[in-house]
Amino acid sequence: MRYVVRTPEGELVYPSLLDVERAYVQGLVDPEDEVREETALTWRKAGSLPTLAQARRTSSGAAARGQALMVMGVVLLGGLALSLLFRDSWNLRLLGIVLALMASFMLTRVTFKAFKRPPPAG
């Protein structure tokens, strides 16, 4: 079944819903664009179609770099915390424990961000 996508620039015809989904994931079709089957009369927002709403948008390079920088920061923070734990001063050991707790909190955030699905658009 062919699908017609209406954008502000004009209309495009896709051979199948899978092709529309690929275009949606690549950013060629926005959630506000209208989609209809070629034989149907009603237009629907692309973001309201269940197949497209569940499709994951590719994360931008900035978001991917943000996660990588966060992980590198946690590794450095964990190394500093570990080195402080083996010092003779109790104050430095306590600081090492606090830094280790901060590192575990940051890793928990990274994990939740990695598995969190993007909110439905629209």
Image: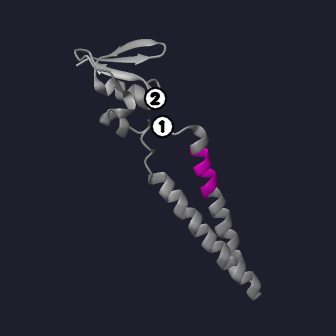
Q: Residue at x 37, y 27 (%)?
A: 45
Disc 1 secondary structure class: loop
Quadrant including the C terminus: top left
**Percent x, y for residue 1?**
22, 19
Give me the disc on residue 58. 1
Q: Which three-letter amino acid code belongs to the residue tagged 2?
A: Gln
Q: Residue at x 57, y 69 (%)?
A: 104
Disc 2 secondary structure class: helix
**Percent x, y for residue 34?**
38, 22
Question: Between 14 and 76, which is closer to the camera in this rendering?
Answer: 14
Q: Quarter-wise, where is residue 92 in the image? A: bottom right
Instruction: Quickly name the residue at label 2.
Output: 26
- Left/right placement of residue 34 relative to residue 91 reads left
Q: Which three-letter amino acid code belongs to the residue tagged 1?
A: Thr
Judge whether 116 appears above or below 79 on screen.
above
Query: Which coloring applies here?
Result: one colour
Q: Residue at x 43, y 48 (%)?
A: 117
Query: Which comes before the other along the chain, label 1 or label 2?
Result: 2
Q: Quarter-wise, where is residue 41 in the image? A: top left
The magenta stretch is 64-71
| Residue found at the very far top of the displayed protein | 10
Judge whether 68 appears above or below 14 on screen.
below
Q: Sort mark 2 into few (<14), some (14-19) or many (20+) by Cα contacts within 10 Å.
A: few
**Percent x, y for residue 93?**
71, 83
Q: Is residue 99 magenta?
A: no
